[in-house]
Amino acid sequence: MKVDRKAPHHPSVGGDTGPRLPAAPRSIQKGSSLGALLDVEAIECLAHNICRVHPNFDVDAFRATALHGLAPLAILHRGRHLARALRSHLPKRYEDAIDVLIRSLTPALTETSDLGLAVFFYLPHVSFVDAFGLDTDGNGGRDPFEVSMRAQHELTRRFSAEFSMRKFLIHQPERTLAKLMEWTRDPDPHVRRLCSEGSRPRLPWAIRIPGFIKDPRPVLPILEAMKDDPDLYVRRSVANHLGDIAKDHPQLAFEICHRWLDGASTERKWLIRHAVRHPAKKGITTALKLRELAR
């Protein structure tokens, strides 16, 4: 999950006529919670952004639905709650609703660090794809896969689609992995990072991917393609993904790291050290040796 200390570098914040993001602290303040990021102001920004591109949007009805039952919910449940509220008031056909949401987005992020907490504004959008993005019936009988992939490509450039992507990897793994493999060559590092982060078998805060916990080999070509990515933001995700694999298949993770040592750059050596840091802390000999060889 992309959370850092500072507010995001984002040209739209504070604009009066363009799409807006709610104000957000640089970090969680004492006595507050992440849930406060999806409160009244976020709902107003959602309504404002959608009305700009979909004038028939019933703001009052959406506001009432969104606020009803919101107060006791934590951040992830608020994201799902607001997604359901959006579904009730956007066009009935999924791809039409997605078109409205995509056209309502603020500009894509231009940095990969110091992203701050304002990006959580897009958790309801991601939750929308997660909840409805595989429902053919809700899309007039048409397969919504490509529409959902397009949405996640756009959303991950503003927040992260690592949560929503997991349902696609569970239910349509081959099709989704093929798309992610294609995206490993995307010019945007946020998109490339999603290929690794979204497919991590044990991603924190997210549902696990049982198939990849049992057998991570289908995802290995994605990690292979990005082990020397030019952006540390992406390489760190690859390292964390390998660390996930090491929890269930340590020998496989160690074998990959050994192979990657051949001709390794300074950057790749850092990736290897980071990938095996947890087993090394437990004193596992192979991990300690790998970290030494990757100096």
Image (cartoon, helix red, strand yellow):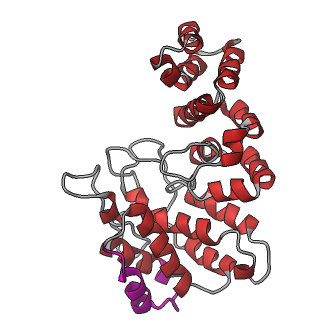
Q: Please provide percent x and percent y for residue 131.
A: 60, 70
In the rendered view, would you say 133 is above or below 51? above
Q: Based on the displayed image, in which of its 4 quarters is residue 71 positioned? A: bottom left
Q: Please provide percent x and percent y for residue 211.
A: 71, 46
Q: Please provide percent x and percent y for residue 126.
A: 54, 63
54 part of magenta stretch: yes
Residue 64 placement, left or right of 293:
left
Is residue 108 among the parts visible in the rendering? yes
Q: Based on the displayed image, in which of its 4 quarters is residue 92 positioned? A: bottom right
The residue lying at 48 percent from left, 43 percent from top is 112
In the rendered view, would you say 188 is above or below 140? above
Residue 185 placement, left or right of 191:
right
Q: Residue furthest left?
A: 31
Q: Of residues 178 and 99, which is closer to you in this image?
A: 178
Specify start and end residues of the magenta stretch as a single range: 50-71
59 part of magenta stretch: yes
Is residue 11 among the parts visible in the rendering? no
The residue lying at 47 percent from left, 63 percent from top is 123
Residue 158 placement, left or right of 146:
left
Q: Based on the displayed image, in which of its 4 quarters is residue 144 positioned? A: bottom right
